[in-house]
Image (cartoon, helix red, strand yellow):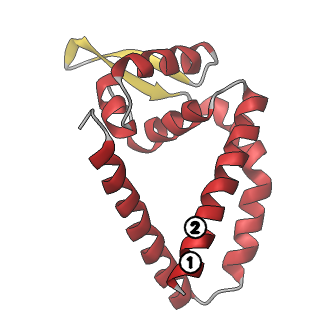
């Protein structure tokens, strides 16, 4: 079963990557832009250096990503009120309907899948996925030269 799960996780990663690529192309964003936008939305507001650490990317790479996201109206850079020299990046939530519209098909499919499981089964799946995400984060951190 472990091999079957591993194979399914690889297939899932590929399919989600392809979905993000298609969505990015429609929004004129690169795949990494969408990843960073998600990090800013979930963890933000973030400083550019904080985003670089979270994404495991070089700060110079983050500058280009933030330039694209800002020019597309996805994020704003603001002065940190507690330290006027620092900049924080905040997601512009008014652009999210465009993004959610493109993910709607996947979200509908996921809701149909959830409906086929008991609450206790969903708890096990959620635990497995969280542990898997943590393992992926650990592996990424180990390879990242920004940590």
SS for tag 1?
helix
Q: Is residue 88 left or right of residue 10?
A: left
Q: CA distance from mark 2 to mark 1?
A: 6 Å
Which of the numbered marks, if any, corresponds to residue 9? Answer: 2
Can you give x and y, in whole percent of width and height, for residue 57 in the image? 38, 30
Classify 71 as above or below 112: above
Q: Name the side, left or right, on which 140 lies relative to 126.
A: left
Q: Is residue 112 above or below residue 30?
A: below
Horizontally, residue 22 falls left or right of residue 124, namely right
Q: Residue at x 40, y 57 (%)?
A: 136
Give the residue number, with chain letter if any, for mark 1. 5
CB under 8 Å between discs 2 and 1: yes
**Mark 2 falls on what kind of element?**
helix
Outermost residue, top side: 85
Residue 12 falls in image quadrant: bottom right
Q: Residues within 10 Å of mark 2 (few under 14, many from 20)?
A: some
Q: Position of residue 36 (x, y in %)?
A: 49, 34
Residue 31's spot in the image, x, y percent? 61, 35
Residue at 76% x, 74% y is 112
Q: Quadrant of the N terminus?
A: bottom right
Residue closest to the far front: 3
Position of residue 20 relative to residue 24, above or below, is below
């Amino acid at each position: 079963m472990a091999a079957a799960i591993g194979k399914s996780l690889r297939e899932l990663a590929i399919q989600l990557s392809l979905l993000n690529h298609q969505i990015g192309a429609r929004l004129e964003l690169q795949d990494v832009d969408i990843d960073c936008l998600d990090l800013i939305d979930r963890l933000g507001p973030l400083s550019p250096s904080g985003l670089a650490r979270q994404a495991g990317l070089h700060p110079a790479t983050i500058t280009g990503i933030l330039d694209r996201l800002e020019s597309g109206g996805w994020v704003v850079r603001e002065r940190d009120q507690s330290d006027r020299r620092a900049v924080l990046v905040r997601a512009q939530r008014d652009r999210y309907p465009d993004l959610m519209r493109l993910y709607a098909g996947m979200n509908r499919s996921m809701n149909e899948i959830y409906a086929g499981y008991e609450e206790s089964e969903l708890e096990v799946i959620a635990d497995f996925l969280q542990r898997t995400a943590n393992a992926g984060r650990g592996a990424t951190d180990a390879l990242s030269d920004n940590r």
